[in-house]
């Protein structure tokens, strides 16, 4: 896995931002590949949106606390832009946005403190990881769980079924 350095958008329509960021990552990854051999590159950008704005990743525990408190007792949207770019006989780009609704439970101070102390919020969009301790923050989800984790497998399968060949 290669993580290319790209300038990411942070402001704008949430779906447009994650799709553009994913496309930039995929194109940068393809540009980093050498030679003229066929290549298929995946770019993904996942973020949390509430009230029409992206929350992004917190820089510190205070930022994580603000995000968790904003999400407490509310439903938010996890959006992932997925882009697949291909070089070869059929050079092309394919892209889509996956959306999952996540409902947080009401959070008391001790739960927030416990989660912040875990450090799991670091480098996480929305300041939580549903696949870990962050699952205690969530009441329910509607949509693809893998999207909330950060790689929407159903969307990827729809865009690039060749990545999932049938077993013999």
Image: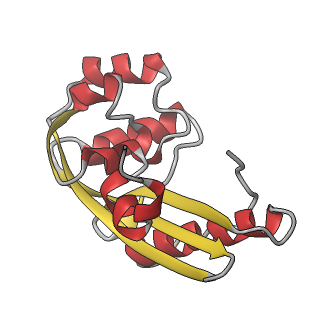
Residue 14, position as x, y percentages in the image: 40, 71
Looking at the rendered image, the quarter that the N terminus falls into is top right
Residue 13, position as x, y percentages in the image: 41, 78
Looking at the rendered image, the quarter that the C terminus falls into is top left
Vertical side of 138 occupied by 3: above or below: below
Left or right of 24 on screen, residue 106: left
Vertical side of 34 occupied by 36: above or below: below
The residue at 15%/43% (across/down) is: 73
The residue at 62%/73% (across/down) is: 86
The residue at 45%/17% (across/down) is: 117
Q: Is residue 159 visible?
A: yes
Residue 99, position as x, y percentages in the image: 28, 63
Residue 55, position as x, y percentages in the image: 43, 56
Left or right of 30 on screen, residue 167: left
Q: Quadrant of residue 27?
A: bottom right
Vertical side of 162 occupied by 145: above or below: above
Q: Quadrant of residue 128?
A: top left
Count of marks, rendered view: 0
Left or right of 116 on screen, residue 42: right
Vertical side of 64 occupied by 154: above or below: below
Residue at the right extreme? 35
Q: Is residue 80 visible?
A: no
Q: Quadrant of residue 143?
A: bottom left
The residue nearer to you, when weighing 72 against 159, is 159
């Amino acid at each position: 896995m290669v993580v290319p350095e790209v300038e990411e958008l942070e402001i704008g329509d949430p779906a447009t931002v994650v799709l553009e960021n994913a496309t930039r990552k995929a194109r940068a990854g393809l540009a980093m590949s050498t030679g003229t051999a066929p290549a298929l590159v995946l770019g993904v950008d996942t973020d949390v949106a509430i009230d029409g704005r992206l929350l992004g990743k917190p820089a510190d525990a205070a930022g994580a606390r603000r995000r968790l408190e904003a999400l407490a007792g509310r439903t938010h949207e996890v959006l992932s832009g997925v882009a697949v770019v291909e070089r070869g006989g059929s050079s092309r780009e394919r892209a889509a946005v996956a959306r999952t609704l996540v409902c947080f439970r009401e959070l008391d101070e001790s739960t927030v403190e416990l989660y912040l102390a875990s450090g799991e919020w670091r480098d996480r969009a929305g300041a939580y990881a549903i696949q870990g301790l962050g699952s205690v923050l969530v009441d329910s989800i509607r949509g693809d769980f893998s999207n909330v984790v950060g790689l929407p497998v159903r969307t990827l399968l729809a865009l690039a079924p060749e990545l999932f060949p049938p077993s013999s």
